[in-house]
Image (tube, grey):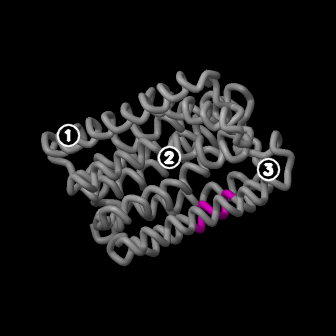
Amino acid sequence: MFAADYLVRGAVALARISGLSPLIIGLSVVAIGTSAPEFVTALAAALSGATDMAIGNVVGSNNVNMLLILGIAAMIRPINVAMKVIARDAMMVIGATALFVAIGFTGGYNRWQGALLVICLIGYLYLTYKAEKAENNKQALHAREAEDVGGVPERGTIATVFLAGGLVGIIVGAELLVRGGLGIAAVFDVSRTIVGLTLIAVGTSLPELAIVIVASWRGHSDIALGNVLGSNIFNLLGITGGVAMIEPLVMPAEVISFDIWVLLGVTILLLPLMITENRISRTEGRFLAALYIAYLAGQLEPVRQLLTPGG
C-alpha cells in the first residue's frame, strides 16, 4: 500500500514536471500506478506456476472494488453519478467483464487473447481521452483524479526517488504476498484460487481503497466512482491481458462454477444502483458492503458446495 502510494506520487510529479496535462496523468499515471500491485502480484504468481492465484487476484480485486471499496465510499458520502460515467465507463466495465468471461469459458487466456484484451484497453483509453479532451481539462473526471493526488514532490530528484522506491517496494511486496499466499494455502489446506480471491485481492486493492476514501472524504465522490470503474477495466483488460502475453493463464474450475457468476452479477447490479436518483446512497453503500461479507462467507467450502451448481 505504501509502495503504491509513493509510486503514484513520484509518477504524478514527474508527469507534471514534464508538462503532461492533468487528463493524461489521470488516465494513465494514476490508473496504472494504483493497478501496479495487482499486475506485479498476478505476474509473480503466474511465473511461480500459480496461475489460479493470478486469476483469483483479478476476479477478487474487482469484487473488492465494486462491493467493499465502493460501499465504504458511499457510506462516507453518497456518490453522485453523472450520466456520462454511466454511458461510457460503466458500460465499458460491463463490456470488459463480458469479454473476460467469454474468453475465460474457453479454458483460459493464451498470448493472442491477452493481446486482444490489451488492445481493447488501449482503445478505451484513446476514446476516453478524445471525449474528455473536448471538455475543460480541469472539469474532466480523470483530470480531476490527477489533481486529487496529494503529497506530490516538486523536485525531480525527490520524485525519481519516490518512483524508484515505490516500484522496488511493489515488486518486493508482491513477491512476499505470493509466497505468503502459497504458504497459507498449504498450511490451511485451501485452494490457491480462494487465497487469491480473498486475502491477496484485498491486499492488492489497498491503494484504490486509500485513494477512494480520501476522495470521498473531500467530497469528490465522482472521482471515487471513476477510480473504481477505471481500476476494474484495467484489471480485466490490462492485467489479465498483460500477464497472459507473458505467461498464459488457465481459468480455474472453481472460478468458473462460482466466482465468475458473482463478478457478472455484481457488475450488472451496479447499473441500476447508479441510475436510481443518479447516485449511490449510504443505504446502498451498506448493502454493497454487506454483499461483500456474504461473498467472503461464500468462500467457505461448505457454503461453496451449497451454492455451486450440482454441489
Query: What is the crowding at mark 3: few (fewer than 14 residues within 10 Å), some, or many (at least 20)?
Result: some
Confirm or deny contact between disc 1 and disc 2 (CB under 8 A).
no
Along the viewing direction, whichever of 252 and 109 lies nearer the viewer: 109
Where residue 152 appears, as percent x and y from the top left, is: 62, 25
Q: Residue at x 50, y 46 (%)?
A: 291
Name the residue nearer the viewer: 64 or 284.
64
Q: Which residue is mark 1?
A: 184
Eyeballing the image, is 112 above or below 210?
below
Location of residue 200 (image quadrant): top left
Pointer 3 or 1: first along the chain: 3
In the rendered image, residue 290, in percent from the top left (x then y), is placed at 51, 41
| Closer to viewer: mark 2 or mark 3 | 3
Who's the residue at 27% across and 51% down the image? 45
Left or right of residue 68: residue 60: left
Mark 1 lies on a secondary structure that is helix
Label for residue 82?
3
- Distance from Cα at disc 1 to Cα at disc 2: 25 Å
Q: Residues within 10 Å of mark 1 (few under 14, many from 20)?
A: some
**Label 2 neighbour load within 10 Å: few <14, some 14-19, many 20+:** some
132 lies left or right of 27: right
Q: Which residues are magenta?
A: 89-95
Query: Does residue 278 sit above or below 108 in this rendering?
Result: above
Amino acid on which disc 1 is placed: Ile
Give the CA separation, mark 3 to mark 1.
Answer: 42 Å
Image quadrant in which you'd find residue 80: top right
**Residue 49: % across, % down:** 21, 57
| SS for callout 2 | helix
